[in-house]
Amino acid sequence: MQKLFFLRGLVVVVTTLLFYSFIIFLYSSFVPSVGANNFRSWLPNALYIPGGRGYTLLRLKEAERVSDVDILFVGSSQVYRGFDVRIFESSGLKAFNLGTSAQTLFNTYYLLEEYLPTLNPEYIVLDLYWGVGKNDGVEPSIDIVSNSDLDENTLEMVFDLKNAPVYGTLFAACITRLRTPLHEIRQKEFKDARYIPGGFSESLITKNKLDPKKLGEIEPQNATLHDLQLEYLQKIIALCESRNKKLILVMTPVTKEYKRKVINYANYTNTIAKIAKENNIPYFDYNERKGLSLISSADFSDMNHLSQSGVEKFNGLFIYDLYTSGVLNPSLTLHKHKGPSQPSKSWQARKRQHTAVMRPSN
Amino acid sequence: MLFNSIEFLVFFPAVAGLYFLLPYRFRWLLLLIASYTFYMFWRVDYAIILVISTSIDYVCSRMMDRYMDSEKSKRKPWLWLSLFSNLGILFIFKYYNFFNGAAADLAHLLGMEYAAPAFELLLPMGISFYTFQTMSYSIDVYHGRIKAEKHFGIFALFVTFFPQLVAGPIERAGNLLNQLKERHDFNYQNAANGLKLMAWGLFKKIVIADRLAVMVNQVYNNPTDYEGIPLILATVFFAFQIYCDFSGYSDIAIGSAQVMGFRLMDNFRRPYFSKSIQEFWARWHISLSTWFRDYVYIPLGGNRVVKWRWYYNLFIVFLVSGLWHGANWTFLVWGGLHGFYLVIAELTKERRNAAMDAIGLVQQAPYCKAVQTGTTFALVCLAWIFFRANTIGDALYITTHLFSSLTETAQAIVLNKHAERGVLLYLGQNREVFVLGVAAILVLVVIELSQRSGSLRLRISRYPFPVRVAAYNFLLASILLFGSFSESEFIYFQF
């Protein structure tokens, strides 16, 4: 009797898994994902959406090929839409932008584990935007699983998160890639942004409507770091120390209207500043940076993402700050850089340009 | 530990497996350890309350048993000690702050000084359930309906039996205590039926209740942002959410006990198909309503008293039932409303029947049934507003705005000029979440309708094995594909 029960139970489990796999295969292979990467799905536990809006597919593919960069950017859309690698290249810094949609510190850790050995950056710029700091890491994990090789680090990330939709997405990715391997998946194109080699996503929107209705709908919020994210911030710090990488913490700017919605912004940024100080890490907050004059209607493409004009202003000042604060050591960078530009000239020129127009406050 | 957690997925098969592997004499010990482990996954220190409650009731019941052949007066002090200690613990943890706050408000109104301190105590999970279970045991021993259990371990297991410890069904000693001493060998049908019931309960909890919860919370946490259709939708969704949440828990509890050979009492019998409020209470949370019937309503005189006293009894029982659910005015109003419904139903019974007869509804049985079922559901939903609302103010706002701007909201949903459909119809979620929620409700209704002529589980078990497997595949794959695995607590845990 017991034998029959277990045998039949096994049949039910196995056939359920087969049936489940079949549904996932049908759904992922033949149902078009309209408005990709918006995580709207009829199957909420299998959100496999490759080639979506954040260009994670192209970015991670490129990251496999690139090696020995000077500076690496990690974080959420604030990062991949906020740090233009071309501006850094023109300043003599070989850069790669490894930002992914809603990337939390939890995800950053595993991405660093994966790509540090090949990208081998000297500096790692980590954004601590509060919008993702409070998240549990599910959405970005789904994005990464959908767009990356299912290697050891990705699997470790999935199993550490212990979340059903992420497991489901991993399963869907495994099943679907039997038919369409990762290298055959095509990146979708979007009208409002284009991918720039090096990981940057350039915004093609030049005007921010600043819809008062939408602004009014944004609830006043408290900026916090999820316990999991705090834990992984410490892990990232330790990882960078162990690999002898210089970590730089940064807060990319948002519109002042959006920032005003954060009730405890001062507390939040002070907490990060304290963590940075305790670990002897430089921290730059560009929401508080007086020299950065960003216009909400022109320098942003929405409430919290920079437009290309904003990126240019912000990146220029960031490079200047890195240089003048002594964080970036040009001589260390110069000997590695083999590009055709004249880094020293660019550095000096940029320094002169910024010194002429603004006085940094921090 | 939650039934919808990874831990339980490991815990339960391990306990059930060990249960059948161990020699009979050690099984109670295994279940007792498992039950305390189950509880301590939530809070280790609060297990001491279980130990205290168990010890007091054990001693009191043994003392009452000793005086079983003597005068009742010799047993009475022990009964009082048991009731006083159980209700005392319950009062301190659950009601003290509520009554303290009410007293402070009253004193403020009267211009008097009142400065009793409030306690910052976390409500022990399931305290109302196990307190009521042990109280019924003490009362039954006092009346000589059952003999006091001599084995302390078996009695402790009766208090803490893990499938029903934190959210019922509230078992009677007459049913459960003897089963705990019986030998249960592995039985194919019990194990298979238990697992099926568990799977169905899990489906109700994580596919229906937890998916609806997102939409319900959106509206009920910001009720003043809405009028008309979204308020109606959220209220109806909550009716299904709470039903699936609680009956889902009960199904998993009954099913997991059944796997090990125990029979727990039914707690729900398709309550939303009730044709009257009275019938609703015979089908909803049966273990609690029968508890109140046996230990409050009947001792008050039940319906064998003068009419006004009967109505008073009905009203009081439901008021207490409301208070049992939570120390909040919203629960009191919810209970009071149900008491009021029952009293009004009794008062108007003859006139309603005459009116139905006059309009010819009595002759049209299906229509009559539909009207009665619909009216009962509407009344239950109206009361649910008070149950779910965060404050009385919110509840009053919702009840007074349920039918406001109905045309405007309907028009906005249809035209969707400024993407209002997402807010007013999908309740802040996307279309898929809304459609899946509605589809899940329809599945529930269809399955419940099909159970009018008997248990669906039994009917499925008559089909050949491949057909049964296909049915299980659908159910399990639906849980995997559509379930919300956020390990959200069951609503009734807070009670």
Image: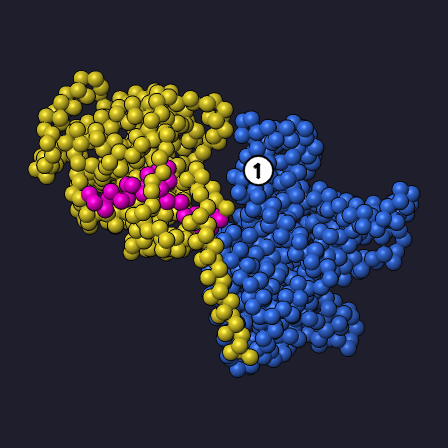
Magenta part of the chain: A43-66
Q: Residue at x 83, y 45 (%)?
A: B344
Q: Amino acid at mark 1?
A: Leu
Question: Measured from the top left, where is residue B176 in percent x and y?
Answer: 66, 71
Question: Measured from the top left, where is residue B358 in percent x and y?
Answer: 91, 43
Task: List the residue tagged with mark 1.
Answer: B427
Chain B color in figure? blue
Q: Is residue B107 above or below residue A171?
A: above
Q: Is residue B134 above or below residue A259?
A: below
Question: Measured from the top left, where is residue B52 in percent x and y?
Answer: 58, 65
The chain painted yellow is A
Q: Is residue B406 above or below residue A114?
A: above
Which quadrant of the structure image shows residue B356?
A: top right
Is disc 1 placed on a helix, strand or loop? loop
Q: Residue at x 39, y 23 (%)?
A: A208
Q: Residue at x 23, y 46 (%)?
A: A64
